[in-house]
Image (cartoon, coloured by chain):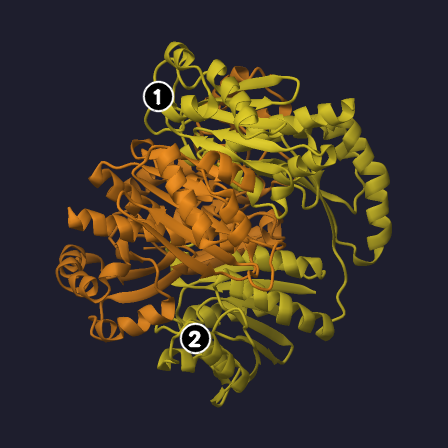
Chain colours: A yellow, B orange
Amino acid sequence: MKASILTVGDEILIGQIVDTNSSYIAQRLGEQGLSICEMRSVGDTREAITGALNELFAASGIVVITGGLGPTKDDITKQTLAAYFGATRMALHEPTLRHVTELLGRRGIALGELNRNQALIPDACEALLNLAGTAPGMWFEKAGKLAVSLPGVPHEMEYLMANEVIPRLKKRFSLGKVYHKHIATAGIAESTLAETIAAWESVLPDYLRLAYLPSPAGVKLRLSCYAADAHTSVADEVEKIYLRQLQALIPAYIVGYDGDTLESAVGRLLKARGATLATAESCTGGRIAALITAQPGASAYFKGGIVAYSNELKVKELGVSPSDIERHGAVSQAVVEQMAQGAQRALQAEYAVATSGIAGPDGGTPEKPVGTVWIATATPDKVTSRKLNLGNDRERTILRTSYGVLNLLRLALTDDNNAR
Amino acid sequence: MKASILTVGDEILIGQIVDTNSSYIAQRLGEQGLSICEMRSVGDTREAITGALNELFAASGIVVITGGLGPTKDDITKQTLAAYFGATRMALHEPTLRHVTELLGRRGIALGELNRNQALIPDACEALLNLAGTAPGMWFEKAGKLAVSLPGVPHEMEYLMANEVIPRLKKRFSLGKVYHKHIATAGIAESTLAETIAAWESVLPDYLRLAYLPSPAGVKLRLSCYAADAHTSVADEVEKIYLRQLQALIPAYIVGYDGDTLESAVGRLLKARGATLATAESCTGGRIAALITAQPGASAYFKGGIVAYSNELKVKELGVSPSDIERHGAVSQAVVEQMAQGAQRALQAEYAVATSGIAGPDGGTPEKPVGTVWIATATPDKVTSRKLNLGNDRERTILRTSYGVLNLLRLALTDDNNAR
């Protein structure tokens, strides 16, 4: 069964907003065995929406639409869908009106005209009560075409997908399954990885498809099988044969599987050891701590961190030697190693990571150009540091430094956990 | 002149990766007066790419394509475009071969077969040398159709857009202009904002189009004028009439204009005052520091921060009273205010922000459910705190808390700067 995703909004087309909804929806539909044949974004005009629906319904029976349901003038998705599916009038959706009145009441706001209009729904659809916001979703179904319209605000869309759309899709269709296995790697470039596993890749069976998915955290590999009924035995075969072969080929680079990330792998390793972590960040400015604490349950192993953006704080909070800063500069092996050890000591953690670098665009010198970064990890036994050269994209340098030192920590933890 | 954007990759369709390239490309093309009529994502098959090109060229003369140029087997964009534009053979692009050899050499890697293939380019296109990576871009032009193919890795695509694509587009077309004015607001809900400015909105002239763009940082308003030639006078009229009216209507909610964000506005206000900032974060776990330091030049006003995830560190590093933690809990007005003052003191900054809350999914109680958050700012004169109730989406709670306290700081700084 094929589906497609349509995003409506001028703000998408002018690049004001990155469309994160489509990937979320694709993941949820994919888990149900629905395969997405296309994603599309069009502007807030009747012609663009209608034209896209015509083309998308030619290739797929289901179109999930986000955006254009707000209370304001520029939002026209509701009227356009009403016309497309031949609605004769707008009807008041009582549960939505009650919910919106109650929601605004809790915030001390009286129900205005704009929000009252959100409870008006074309009679050609079923309303999907949106308990996460004010605009209800809509389920239009006619002549083999199913259109589901959801608000563009991500957490409202997510609420409706989980609580209204997926349960209805399950009831409405008998869905097959798609099998995906993800293998997260870190510390190896895409082309090196491809050459290292070329022989393994070349003997994969026809029903398995391999993809390389690079990101600042590392390259993910994805093995997919779209043969719906073979699901159980495929999973088994992948686990027992192909993953074992892969593990033997690139043991040090595999971070984990499926939902695993560098952050979650580090968390798991720390928990297995009953150990705690602290961070000392200069150029990454809190990004590593933010990545770690984005994980639910991080408080079990994360003590905290110090963002020592100024040299003064590197000395005062982390005990870095002022003369080493003077002699080697803040971006140096001596300083980053002292930062890691200082965080271990000050925050009373067994493990620590530290970063010091020139993220740019200013601050580079001929000897230390923008993108020069030192990273370090401190374990109960030793300190390890590396120099990175990351170029002149500030955001990318911050991310690659953060993932680089998390991978250094993962390797140290793997060694330590193996040595126990 | 109309353009469209095509993203190629199964990883997009299964939701593995969020497509951030399209919004970047749309912004850059928009600045040149090219308007994007559609964005589309399709899978790594010849049929899908060819079908999309046919439909997109029916509506726009320019299609910018990203993805599918990697060295690995699943990448087929190059061959598909070669066939689409009638290439007769693949030709070696010497500058790319030299560049790739040199790039790998610096990393101590010998040139492999996969990377050598990246220098082979269809003879129907012009190669765009990619100094940020290994896969060159390609410029195909034939019978009024222009296709530009770029790698999917964001920083490589960005390099080629800035250094190869935009300069060529400028030379090739005489481009009109589109006028956009963005007004960033914070601390006001979309529907309240719409009702507050309804009268102003209703008398905007026909050539101005208003859009509401909500995000966790606040609602952005965008005024657009697509009448190419009126550009200069429109800008003037918007500045002198409509923005002044808007400023009078919602003075406290306007954060800034165009590229301005809460983070940049706070930075500007601190710099204007010659003041410094420190952060003390619990539930936001470093996110605020990361937002602040994502700004180039943040070291001029940001001293640093303490991520005090454990109560122990709140006491030790920030001087929070252990008996107040005992009596009121870590998520309380007393504790968050002491955290802000502690950061001011420990990190020697004039201003500080602090957060303490229950981001979830665990840790809630009947009196303090998940989503309960306290935020505080400390200025040289006073401490201000607020309680927020943000629901049970961890990531959203972290973001809304971060932006909430940055807005509290912005208001405090605006007051202080006005009072001088």
Amino acid at dot 1: Gly
Image spot of residue B122 (x, y percent): 52, 35
Q: Quadrant of residue A415?
A: top right
- Foreground: disc 2 or disc 1: 2
Say left or right for B40 vs A71.
right
Give the residue drawn at x 28%, y 60%.
B253
Q: Chain of mark 1?
A: A
Secondary structure under tag 1 reads loop
Give the residue drawn at x 50%, y 40%.
B314
Q: Quadrant of residue A366?
A: top left
Mark 1 neighbour class, 10 Å CA radius: few under 14, some 14 to 19, many 20 or more: some
Say left or right for B2 vs A259.
left
Give the residue drawn at x 42%, y 45%.
B338
Residue labelled with disc 2: A104
The reply to whether residue B141 is visible in this rendering is: no
Spatial CA distance of label 2 from label 1 is 52 Å
Residue labelled with disc 1: A364
Give the residue drawn at x 75%, y 66%.
A175
